[in-house]
Image: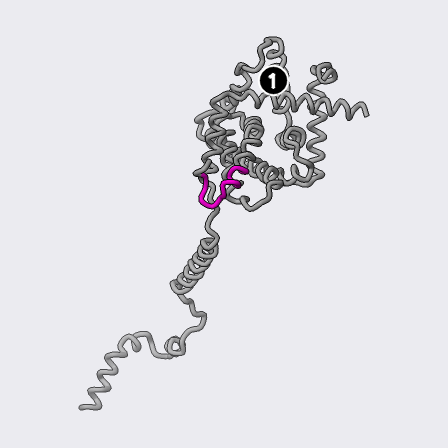
C-alpha cells in the first residue's frame, strides 16, 4: 500500500514537472507548433475515393504489361534440335558438302536442262 | 481555419485542430526527449499530424490519440535508424567522430519561466525538471515511451500497446521498470514527493 502511494506521488511529481515544462514553452516553439497544425489542416484532403481503384487498375495493367514484354523479349531456348540439324550432324557427308549445297543444286539443274 | 481542406467539413477541421492543439506540446516534448533536437522534434510532430489526418481521418475521435502516438513512435524509430546510418557513414569516411555527435543541451530547459516570479520556486522547478529529464533520458527508449504515454499522456495499457506496437504485457513490464528506475534516481526528491 505504501509503495502504491509513493508510486502515485512519483507519477504526480513527474506529471506536474512535465506539465510545467510544456506550459512554458518558448514563443518560437509554440509558433512553430501552431504553424505546423495549420499547415496540416490546410493540406487536409482525403484522396478522392474514385482515384484509388483507378490507380490500382493502372498499376495492375503496368505489371501485366511489363511481365508480357519481358516474356516476349526473352530469347526462346529450345532444348530439342530440329530434325534437319540432326540429319546434318548424323550424316556421313562432311560439312563441306553442305557448304557447297547451293553449287550442287545448280549443277543438278544444269544437268537436267543440258 | 475556414480555408482548411477540401474534403473536411468545418466541424471536422475544428475537431482536428482541437485534437492537435491538445497533444502537440506533449508530443513535441516526447520527440525532443527521444531526439535531443528541437527542429527534428518539430518535424516529427508535424509529420505525425499530417499522416494521421491523411490516413486515419475516418477513425473515431477516441482512436485518434493512440494512432497519433503510434505514428509518432514509428517516426522516432525511423529517425533513429536514419541517424545511426548517417553516423556510421561519417565514421567510415572519417568526417566526424560519434563522440562529437553528442547532442547539444536542449535550450528549453534554460529558458526563463515567465509565470514564476519567485526565484526560489523557479529554481526548484528548473532543478526538478533537470533531474527528471536526466532520469528519463537514462531510461531505455521503450521504457521512457511507456512511462510518458501511460503516466503523462494518460493512455491505458491497450492504447499504449497499440501506440508502441507491442503486447500489453510488454507495456506493463516497460512501465514497471521505468517506475522502478525513476523511484531509485529521484530519491533525492523523495521529501518533495512525499510532501506533495
Q: Nearer the viewer, residue B89 or B117?
A: B117
Q: How many marks?
A: 1
Q: Along the horizontal axis of the image, is A43 left or right of B166?
A: left
Residue at 76 percent of width and 22 percent of height: A6
Classed neighbour count for the residue bearing mark 1: other residues with Cα under 10 Å, few (<14), some (14–19), many (≥20):
some
Residue B39 lies, in percent from the top left, at 48, 27
Q: Nearer the viewer, residue A95 or B165?
A: B165
Is B6 included in the stretch rendered in magenta?
yes
Residue B69 lies, in percent from the top left, at 59, 36
Q: Nearer the viewer, residue B57 or B48?
A: B57
Residue at 71 percent of width and 34 percent of height: B173
Is B37 included in the stretch rendered in magenta?
no
Residue A90 lies, in percent from the top left, at 40, 77
- The chosen color scheme is one colour
Residue B135 lies, in percent from the top left, at 64, 22
Residue at 49 percent of width and 40 percent of height: B10
Identify the magenta region.
B4-16
- Residue A108, image quadrant: bottom left
Q: Nearer the viewer, residue B89 or B3?
A: B3
Question: Which residue of the protein is positioned furthest toward the top in this rendering?
Answer: B119
Question: Which residue of the protein is positioned furthest toward the right in this rendering?
Answer: A1
- Mark 1, residue position: B130
Q: Along the horizontal axis of the image, is B127 left or right of A95?
A: right
- Residue B94, image quadrant: top left
Reply above or below: A58 against B128: below
Disc 1 element: helix
Amino acid at each position: 500500500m505504501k509503495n502504491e502511494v509513493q508510486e502515485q506521488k512519483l507519477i504526480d511529481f513527474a506529471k506536474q514537472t512535465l506539465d510545467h515544462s510544456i506550459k512554458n514553452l518558448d514563443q518560437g516553439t509554440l509558433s512553430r507548433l501552431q504553424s505546423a497544425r495549420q499547415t496540416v489542416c490546410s493540406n487536409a484532403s482525403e484522396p478522392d475515393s474514385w482515384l484509388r481503384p483507378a490507380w490500382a487498375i493502372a498499376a495492375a495493367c503496368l505489371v501485366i504489361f511489363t511481365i508480357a514484354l519481358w516474356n516476349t523479349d526473352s530469347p526462346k531456348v529450345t532444348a530439342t534440335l530440329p530434325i534437319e540439324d540432326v540429319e546434318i550432324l548424323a550424316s556421313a557427308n562432311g560439312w563441306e558438302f553442305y557448304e557447297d549445297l547451293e553449287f550442287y543444286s545448280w549443277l543438278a539443274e544444269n544437268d537436267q536442262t543440258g | 481555419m475556414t480555408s482548411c481542406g477540401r474534403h473536411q467539413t468545418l466541424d471536422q477541421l475544428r475537431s482536428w485542430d482541437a485534437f492537435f492543439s491538445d497533444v502537440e506540446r506533449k508530443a513535441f516534448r516526447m520527440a525532443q526527449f527521444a531526439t535531443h533536437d528541437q527542429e527534428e522534434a518539430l518535424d516529427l510532430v508535424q509529420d505525425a499530424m499530417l499522416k494521421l489526418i491523411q490516413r486515419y481521418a475516418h477513425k473515431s475521435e477516441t482512436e485518434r490519440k493512440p494512432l497519433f502516438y503510434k505514428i509518432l513512435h514509428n517516426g522516432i524509430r525511423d529517425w533513429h535508424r536514419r541517424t545511426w546510418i548517417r553516423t556510421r557513414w561519417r565514421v567510415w569516411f572519417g568526417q566526424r567522430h560519434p563522440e562529437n555527435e553528442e547532442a547539444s543541451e536542449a535550450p528549453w530547459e534554460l529558458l526563463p519561466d515567465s509565470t514564476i516570479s519567485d526565484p526560489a520556486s523557479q529554481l526548484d522547478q528548473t532543478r526538478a525538471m533537470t533531474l527528471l529529464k536526466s532520469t528519463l533520458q537514462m531510461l531505455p527508449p521503450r521504457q521512457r515511451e511507456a512511462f510518458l504515454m501511460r503516466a503523462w499522456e494518460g493512455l491505458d495499457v491497450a492504447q499504449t500497446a497499440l501506440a508502441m506496437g507491442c503486447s500489453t504485457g510488454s507495456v506493463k513490464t516497460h512501465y514497471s521498470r521505468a517506475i522502478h528506475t525513476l523511484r531509485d534516481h529521484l530519491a533525492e526528491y523523495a521529501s518533495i514527493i512525499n510532501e506533495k
